[in-house]
Amino acid sequence: MKKPNVLLITSDQQHWNTIGAFNDEVHTPNLDRLVREGTTFTRAYCPNPTCTPTRASIITGMYPSQHGAWTLGTKLMEDRHTVGEDFNAAGYKTALVGKAHFQPLGSTEEFPSLESYPILQDLDYWKKYSETFYGFDHVELARNHVNEAHVGQHYAIWMEEKGCHNWRDYFLPGTGTMDRNQKYSWPIPEEFHYNTWIAERTNALMEQYQEDGESFFLWSSFFDPHPEYLAPEPWDTMYDPDKLTIPELVPGEHDKNPPHFAKTQEENPDFSDLAETGKGIHGYRSHLYYEYGNWPRLTDYDKKKQVAVYYGMISLMDKYIGKILDKLDELGIADNTIVVFTTDHGHFFGQHGLQAKGGFHYEDLIKLPFIARYPGHIPAGKSSEAIQSLVDLAPTFLSFCDIRVPYAMTGVDQKKVWLGEASEARDHAICEFRHEPTTIHQKTYVDARYKITVYYNQTYGEIFDLLEDPGEYNNLWDEPAAAALKSELLLKYAWAELGKESMPMPRISGA
């Protein structure tokens, strides 16, 4: 029998509670279909709440502190072993279509980046590009989220092939730079949207692999609903802002949290004690007002409209995920294809008074939507609380395909859990965030009930009881009654850190 295919479909920065099957305020019929036909894991976590570290973890099966791409602006070194290499060695075709973000926008002589200027927009270079990229023997890449200035690579080539020769007008209007003041409605027609491109090229590759009789490992990597909040008609007005539930700060909820939590709600917060560099939303500075373009402050209308467009972006993406699922059926390979849908990390849109992403390990940011489907193998219509981590994807995919899991991978094999043969493969997850080499450095341990976050060189921290306090409003860190719990969780965290140490060389002899 032909080896099973693996199709990984990811969104970018999608809150865990934005699938229509579980939230009737958002419309996602195709993700709902996956929910009906597969198993939804309600306790899935990212290893880092930003893009590069988590995406590197997906393909290495290692934590950011192990593979080295520890924050945005860093690079996953090309000598790191990736899961694509294992699939290639087993005779699979491997491909990535969409967002990679394994390398930074900046480049140096010591650390060159193919995802940086000027090569990013050298379309002649990308037309000829045929090298293996982090274990993927075929890639079709882009770097932009909506109208970011750094559009280029294969997406721009595709737009020109489709007759959209004025594509720069949608990304670099007028002055030749990004229009950072554009709000909500994006004038690019849906036919030229990157969702359309990703689905079309994913389907073309699957057709080719099926025609050639090849098994494949294919990652369809969507960009939405990562801000900026922009969608083409009619998706930009699909949702009425006044009919949506908009999360808000609960008065007093930051009173017992580390000091930088309350500072985010101040008019002009001072984070100099944390050696904050001020690098935008990924630090601490702009989480209250969402500073962007001419948005120095979010109005009450903006807070609602952002969510409406965010949901519209999800629904638009869902349409094109549906086209990919339909192609699997059309090709007759759905029953032999493991499909996983998830995202790289979550998103704030008002929860705890915060916006976007950064160094706050609330469930909103580190918990993920996560669905696995494999007809006849993974139970259909099931929901599981078994803890998952994105570092587990690589070893689990290899296990399903009977390919040896490299010793260096520190993620765990979830195959038996996905098949419904085991209740759990791990009893905790670890999430890391390190924005600076100094004090913005934290790690979170979360188990079936509790969550603890510790900070480098700091005596403050967070403990939340997710059973009694699922909204994470009552920090137990300094509660005298929780002193024994704190000691227990600190010990469990230490054990978890010891347990995830990489051991690339097995012990083969007593001496």
Image (cartoon, grey):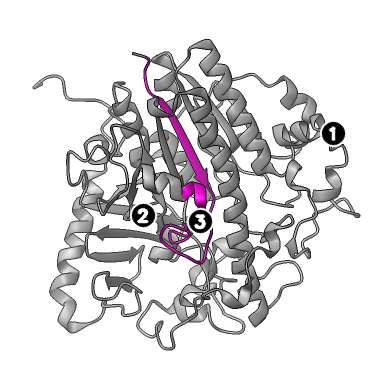
User: 55 or 319: which is nearer to us?
Assistant: 319
Task: Tell me the quarter of the picture where residue 458 sits.
Answer: bottom left
Question: How many dots with numbers?
Answer: 3
In the picture of the structure, the residue carrying the numbered disc 2 is 431
Q: CA distance from mark 3 to mark 1?
A: 31 Å
Q: Is residue 239 above or below residue 406?
A: below
* Label 1: which secondary element: loop
Question: Residue 284 vs residue 170: left or right?
Answer: left
Task: Please name whichever residue, 300 or 234, is drawn nearer the observer in this view of the structure.
Answer: 234
The Cα–Cα distance between marks 3 and 2, rounded to whole angstroms, is 17 Å
Cα–Cα span, label 2 and label 1: 44 Å
Which residue is rendered at x = 28% and y = 65% of the image?
452
Q: Which residue is mark 3?
A: 14
Q: SS class of the residue under badge 3?
A: loop
Q: As shown in the figure, which amino acid type bears the numbered disc 2?
A: Cys
Mark 2, secondary structure of its residue: strand
Disc 3 residue crowd, few under 14, some 14–19, many 20+, Cα 10 Å: many
* Stretch of the chain drawn in magenta: 2-31
